[in-house]
Image (tube, coloured by chain):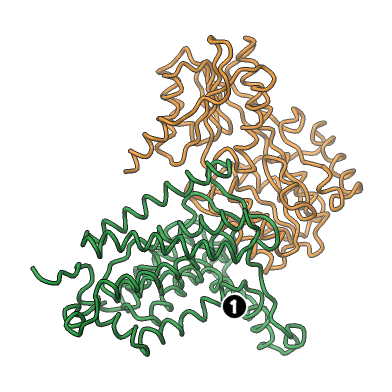
Chain colours: A green, B orange
């Protein structure tokens, strides 16, 4: 019994580690999309900020400087997106895809030019990375049966970005539903003309939403390169931005369901890593290929069976034109 | 867009160093992961660099970033008049088989695969023999009796590493547990450091205290995870002991550097031969690394046991079976 319990707790632990970048990214996407701007460039912003974090952290030796650089760079990319599709009313999907492709090439190219490691950046040194934090009293609380394991293995021993991701959820939900800024964001995504009539600038609001997105994506990117891994490499975001976007749509553009979607993807990923090579009672060892298909099968099943119709913000994807 | 990028990448394949004698031009094409992967490709790069430094002859080089570039890269090197082209990695077998026929005058060498053409030298390694020795080291160093293996792409080549490793572990501790995981089933597995790290963490949670990473660039993620968690790891292909001194127990050396160097060297002096070269412990093609970074953890006692087994394998009294599909 206790062995199974420990395995389950460790599986949940792994889920949290894998969900962190998805959670940041999905919440990031929520702000822009609720403001009526499609953001398919989450992937690019995450990859770009992973690059910036690794570059700055490896030069300065400070993980916090790396995180700051990640946020700044990600916000710059968000502003480019804004300039193209808010100011100049360009197509939002095209602009997002363009950002993704640009960053995919720019990161390794600059890394190659600056660090001469064939497009990679290695981050070494203890303070250049966010390392696991042991929560206080693990020794004492660890003695408590069942709940002790939960505290020591699941809650303690993550790096600070994992805890920040957990904080980002209530904070984002509060901003979106309980503040004036959040109300306006939601309004501008549903009916920008009404917001404009009330004397509030649609463009400025959407730019501010993009800045929030940029900052959150910065956390996701920094997590990839200076917390989970020790460095930047080509295509290291590996489609996580798209996965986060899927979770956002999954969650109907609402914070809690979107984060649950992220946790689901992360859980499937964690489970498949652990099921490999383990003999399941009654079935025997499952082939690697089948196990690695689990996350995708799960996605299809859930999308088909349980989620139902996802209704997007009404003004999403349409550039706001004051008068024709 | 992909093809555009690929074309641009091919166009920027650079000539490194000054070209020496105009009639001899070696070329090397690296595998996914890139020449600074600290592992497989880096070993090949070191061999090419050694040749350049000794002979003063520069070499053409190319690093592929996706599968579709393999064919292009080979053709490009033929067009540029390379005398010998070393293709690093089994992934080149299919395109090379076609191109070797189209360019019968060019000499080719391929690492980790066999291409049966009169102008191709196929260099394969007995990874199971080297892995056997590091498997013994893992079993000797493990306190829990559980050791792990993180492989790259799940293919027979990597299974061969795992198979030899497991035999080595059992040679020392017949009742030890070996947990083997793979980072993927597509070529992206070679670069997925995050997945390798997560797999290693999963194994540590199951009680593993020594993990052997045979996953190219991705393997560095497993080594990092071991260092972060205070566990032991075993590197692969290149000597990876220096990556995390005190945590990397040893590295299973696969002397790709010697293979590349010898291919260039023999092609230059005219003694190059096509056919299959199979390099094991007896040929010094595989081995394990001992240096100042691991002398604290790989004790003289362990080394004595490994040396004994090595001698027995070379003499043929200790049999290590290769992986059979």
Which residue is pictured at 28% across the width and 81% down the height? A186
On the rendered structure, is A77 left or right of B143? left
Q: Could you say which quadrant of the image residue A41 lies in?
A: bottom left
Q: Could you say which quadrant of the image residue B41 lies in?
A: top right
Which residue is pictured at 71% across the width and 45% down the height? B240
Above-or-below relation of B65 to B28: below
Which residue is pictured at 28% across the width and 67% down the height? A38
Q: Which residue is mark 1?
A: A8
x%, y% of residue A42?
Answer: 38, 63
x%, y% of residue A279?
Answer: 59, 65
Which residue is pictured at 42% across the width and 81% down the height? A172
In this rendering, does residue A1 appear at all? no
Give the secondary structure at mark 1: helix
Quadrant in the picture for the C terminus of chain B: top right
Quadrant in the picture for the N terminus of chain B: top left
- What's the chain of the residue with tag 1? A
Q: As drawn, which residue projects farthest toward the front?
A: A199
x%, y% of residue A162?
Answer: 56, 74
């Amino acid at each position: 019994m206790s062995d199974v319990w420990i395995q389950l707790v460790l599986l949940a632990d792994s889920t949290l580690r894998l969900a962190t970048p998805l959670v940041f990214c999905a919440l990031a996407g929520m702000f822009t999309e609720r403001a009526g701007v499609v953001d398919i460039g989450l992937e690019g912003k995450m990859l770009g900020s992973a690059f910036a974090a690794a570059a700055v952290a490896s030069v300065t030796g400070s993980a916090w400087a790396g995180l700051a650089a990640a946020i700044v760079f990600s916000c710059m990319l968000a502003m480019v997106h804004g300039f193209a599709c808010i100011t100049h009313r360009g197509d939002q999907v095209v602009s997002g895809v363009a950002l993704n492709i640009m960053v995919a090439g720019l990161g390794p190219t600059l890394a190659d030019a600056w660090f001469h490691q064939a497009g990679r950046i290695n981050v070494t040194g203890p303070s250049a990375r966010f390392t696991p934090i042991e929560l206080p009293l693990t020794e004492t609380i660890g003695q408590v049966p069942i709940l002790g394991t939960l505290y020591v293995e699941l809650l303690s021993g993550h790096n600070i970005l994992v805890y920040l991701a957990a904080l980002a959820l209530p904070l984002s939900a509060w901003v979106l539903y309980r503040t004036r800024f959040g109300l306006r964001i939601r309004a501008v995504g549903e009916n920008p003309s009404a917001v404009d009539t009330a004397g509030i600038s649609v463009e400025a609001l959407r730019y501010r939403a993009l800045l929030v997105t940029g900052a959150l994506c910065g956390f996701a990117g920094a997590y990839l390169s200076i917390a989970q891994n020790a460095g930047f490499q080509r295509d290291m975001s590996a489609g996580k931005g798209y996965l986060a976007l899927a979770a956002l749509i999954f969650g109907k553009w609402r914070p809690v369901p979107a984060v649950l979607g992220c946790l689901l993807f992360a859980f499937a990923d964690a489970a498949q890593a652990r099921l490999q090579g383990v003999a399941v009672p009654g079935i025997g060892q499952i082939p690697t290929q089948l196990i690695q298909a689990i996350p995708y099968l799960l996605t299809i099943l859930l999308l088909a069976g349980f989620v139902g119709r996802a209704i997007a913000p009404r003004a999403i994807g349409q550039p706001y034109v004051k008068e024709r | 867009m992909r093809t555009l990028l690929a074309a641009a990448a091919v166009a920027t394949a650079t000539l490194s160093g000054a070209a020496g004698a105009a009639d001899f031009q070696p070329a090397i094409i690296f595998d996914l992961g890139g020449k600074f992967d600290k592992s497989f490709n880096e070993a090949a790069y070191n061999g090419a660099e050694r040749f350049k430094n000794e002979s003063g002859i520069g070499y053409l080089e190319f690093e592929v970033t996706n599968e579709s570039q393999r064919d292009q890269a080979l053709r490009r090197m033929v067009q540029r008049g390379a005398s010998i082209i070393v293709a690093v990695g089994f992934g080149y077998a299919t395109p090379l088989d076609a191109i070797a026929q189209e360019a019968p005058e060019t000499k080719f060498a391929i690492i980790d695969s066999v291409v049966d053409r009169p102008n191709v030298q196929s260099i394969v390694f007995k990874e199971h023999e080297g892995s056997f020795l590091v498997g013994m080291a893992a079993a000797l160093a493990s306190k829990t009796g559980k050791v792990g293996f993180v492989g790259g792409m799940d293919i027979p080549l990597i299974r061969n590493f795992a198979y030899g490793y497991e035999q080595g572990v059992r040679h020392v501790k017949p009742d030890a547990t070996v947990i083997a995981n793979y980072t993927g089933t597509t070529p992206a597995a070679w670069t997925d450091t995050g997945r390798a790290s997560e797999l290693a963490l999963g194994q540590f949670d199951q009680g593993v205290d020594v993990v052997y990473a045979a996953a190219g660039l991705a393997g560095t993620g497993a080594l990092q995870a071991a260092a972060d968690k205070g566990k032991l790891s075993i590197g692969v292909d290149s000597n990876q002991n220096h990556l995390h001194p005190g945590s990397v127990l040893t590295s299973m050396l696969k002397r790709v550097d010697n293979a590349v160097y010898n291919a260039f060297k023999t092609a230059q002096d005219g003694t190059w031969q096509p056919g299959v070269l199979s390099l094991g412990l007896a040929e010094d093609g595989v081995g394990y690394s001992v240096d100042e970074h691991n002398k604290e953890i790989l004790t003289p006692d362990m080394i004595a046991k490994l040396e004994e087994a090595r001698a027995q394998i070379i003499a043929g009294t200790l049999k290590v079976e290769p992986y059979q599909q």
